[in-house]
Image: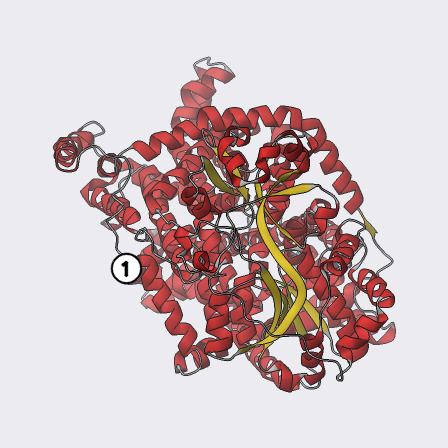
Amino acid sequence: MNKRRWIRLAIVLAVAAVAAIVAAFASTSAHAGKPTIVLATNSWEGSLANNVVAQYVIEKDLGYNVNLLTIDEDPAWPAMSQGKVSAVLEEWGHSNLYAQYIKGNHKVVDAGLEGPDGNIGWYVPTYLMKSHPELKTWKGVKQDWKLFVTPQSSPKGQFLDGSPSYVTNDTALVTNLGLNLKTVFAGTEAAQLTEIEQDYKAKKPVLFYWYTPQFQNAIYKFSQVALPPWTTTCAKLKPAQINCAYPPYHLYKVMDANLASEAPTVASFIRRFNWTSDDQNTVAYNLAVKHMSNSAAAAAFVNSHKALVQSWISSSSKPTKIEPPAAGT
Amino acid sequence: MSAPTATPLYLADAVRRLDHRLGAHMRWAAPIAIAVPLCILAAALEGIHSGFPSNWVLGVPRWFDDLDNWVTNNDESSFFLHSVVGGFGNLLNSATNDVVHFLHWLTWVGVLAIAVTVAWLVGSWRTALFSALMISSFGVLQIPNGGANGISQMWPSAMTTLALMAVAIALSTIVGIPLGVASAVWPAVHKTLRPVLDLMQVLPAFAYLVPIVVLFSIGNPAGIVATFIYAVPPLVRYTELGIRSVPKDVIEAADSFGSTRRQILRNVQLPLATQAIMLGLNQVIMMALSIVVIASLVGAGGLGDPVLAALQTEQNGEGLIAGVLIVFMAMWLDRTSAALGARASRTGPTRRKLTRTELVGVWGGLAALVLVCRYGFGLGDWPAGWGFSLVDQATNALNWLTDRLIGVTTPISSFLTLHLLNPLQRYLYDVPWWLVAAIVGTVGWARGGWRRGLLLVGCVVLLGLMQAPIGYTFQGTVSYNFSAWADAMQTLSLILVALALDLIIGIPLGIAAYRWRPVDHVLRPILDTLQTLPAFVYLIPMVALFGVGNVTGMCASLIYALPAAVRATTLGLRAVQRDVIEAGHAFGSTRWQLLFKVELPIARPYLMLAVNQTILLVMAEVVVAGLVGAGGLGLDVVTGFSRSEVGLGAAAGLAMVLMGIVLDRLSQSSPERTQHGGA
């Protein structure tokens, strides 16, 4: 190691830095032509099912490149407002983000309803419901809390929640309904499902947060526990005071406000994209259980639903209805 | 991987500090004399309540929420945000894209040939062969059915990760080495930088992901900045240490020849510090690779994506294969950079240096090869047909293992939860905050002087004050009760148990590796894998075995920190001087007598350092516990990230940092002040 060697190293580094900067500018100016469409994939399989079909149609029929980006629900909104994500095809609630980005700074636009209605609630495996019919309502849970005691929640019963990124009122519900339960967040849906599967195999009792549409419902038999019915008065309560069931969710689509000018045919497609829970479950099942590739699962659906797909890309059909999420969801 | 070679410098420094130890018994008298009456006073004034008063609130979450709102509303009008931050982000993004394009342009033959040649030049033919194997795996191991993200070929993902690493490492080098030099030269810089580096190392990556996304949006720049923050501290520290540890007489000699300060730095100190700087770089590479998956959470692509997608869709086999590829990339880069470091310091096996003509020939040949492959044969990425899938085998193996083991693991998990973790947690909940503060303060004072004691008491109180006021509604609509103290105690229980198990398993393994060479050879690759395999890969299979909750949460930390415990023990024992051991032999001691009477006692300070390093690594990984149901600060931080609750994520992250500072300073076995004045 001598002086000359250091000087040489410095020169190499300097040249590399200059080259990188020049190349950086060169590559930014080189972007031209059609923009790449980025669809945000949230952490549930249904979200992926929406996206693979949309990707297939946009690439085959509209001629744009599509990337799927795995990202959580909340961070997808700022990303959309900055043009990093083009659209999200399934939103659950998020009235706060709706107010901030759609009504507030107008950087995101509502692209109408997706079709399926989302239903969040408390569930137990059906084998448990059969042996303990009182679990049909939350009062049965109040009575039978001992069934759900695990080492983790001991001495209370365990309420198994999923990903902390999902919409949940469960901690408030447990307190306000006076249940002797402890909410345990599995942290991710995969962890939650793994836990449920192990219990299911061993036919053990388990009480958990779950929702439809969900393709796993075709594999496992779960039954819903009725909570006190949702009312508009209950919807006005503060999050910590909520004491009723989850509201019905009309799932909707959102997109980057600039998409209509940057890729008008794609924006028009997203406004018209609309299908049913069954459609989504079929595709999700093919992806997750039959291990079909994204394009194969999408092609199978598109080829068997030609008229539906045509209505998404034809400009003469009507865009889907716009219905903002209920307050507090 | 890097730890074994890296530790001696750090150790030597610590041992020097240890020599300055004050009279051992007197150190405890004064702190206890002050702490006991204060405790009695606190008990009298406040009564003996468990935990921390819920109405003592600073409102930290709200500060960060307000800041976040300001940034969201001003990102276009503010010059700083729009031009400086945005421009920097664009620069990183285009640099990464350029490297990606370049790697694809090189064709797979080119990438392989260049990597193998570099490995051969800096190392030996064995390094070269190893590199070839590791790189081929990116093409050979495939995920056939597309995985959740539609990826079947792993080669492009591997190239993206390689490009992200290249840019993140370049950024770390450009910033880290000058900072290290400045810190060694000017004490003021050292003093300012030290707490900042501490913060960067202990702050969980999840806690700064949200602010990074707010500033840089999602994508490559966010991933690179997160990697940089996580990976740069060791480089700064090693550079500084390297320059500082240049012997005084060498500098004096240069001085007496009339060299200026700048000349001394450039011609004497920097060259002599090369080995340390290389070790730092090696560490940067390892740390950067260990957060590939976390970088994917903010939209940086690459090998992290399939791991994340597999985690989210429960395709454990796919996750395992993608995770193994990350390990292979880490091993390849580690071996190559370690060989480079050994060469730079001339400690490694030396081979005849190639002459300039030979070098020109080698590189010219490579360039010709690339051009022929690219334009002659029209090659591109690794051919799709040249590979196979082990996904089904991996999935089956995991399922088979789960089915066999579950009968054993479920009772173990219940036992650990019911009889160890839950009671410990309840106990920690019940201790009044002032008692914790008093104990921490006393130990801190005894070990590092009254300043350190005071600092630690301050940290404990501040930790409690991080909480949100009762009923504070975070930005979103979520109802979330953030009690920093209770959550910290829950996390602390996981840390303590993981630490204890690491030491119980790690120290004997370290001794075994020291005594018997074959054990060392078998352990090395296993430890390497444990250190770089992303926790995300084994979290879900572990949930199947141990269930959602504390035990699984603790395991991630346990596994991540175990290699450090083993290695520091082995190194400590190796550092015991030969002549001492020979003297022992001469007195007729048996091997085991020697171990327990001579080697282990002498290695004690090193073992204390092993404890310290293990604590820091356990801390670094404990957030992951939040992803598998262990709750505590980990869940707060993860919730803060996944719901974009900036205030929650930041306050919980800071609480984690405060806890980290306390545990770190408590486990540092000698007074700081003998070295730099002040804790």
Q: Chain of mark 1?
A: B
Up the image or down, A3 lies above or below B333; here it is below
Q: Nearer the viewer, residue B181 or B362?
A: B181
Q: Nearer the viewer, residue A254 or B596?
A: A254
- The image position of residue B390, as x and y in percent, is 79, 46
Q: Which residue is mark 1?
A: B187
Helix, strand or loop under label 1: helix
Q: Residues within 10 Å of mark 1 (few under 14, many from 20)?
A: few
- Judged left or right of residue B278, residue B426 is left
Residue found 48% across the figure and 41% down from its top: A183
- Judged left or right of residue B74, residue A39 is right
Up the image or down, A100 lies above or below A186; here it is below
- The image position of residue B639, as x and y in percent, is 47, 53
Amino acid type shown at disc 1: Pro
Residue found 35% across the figure and 63% down from its top: B64
- The image position of residue B541, as x and y in percent, is 65, 39
Specify whether residue A12 is in view: no
- The image position of residue B354, as x and y in percent, is 68, 61
Specify whether residue A85 is in view: yes
- Judged left or right of residue B482, residue B300 is right
Identify the image quadrant of the N terminus of chain B.
top right
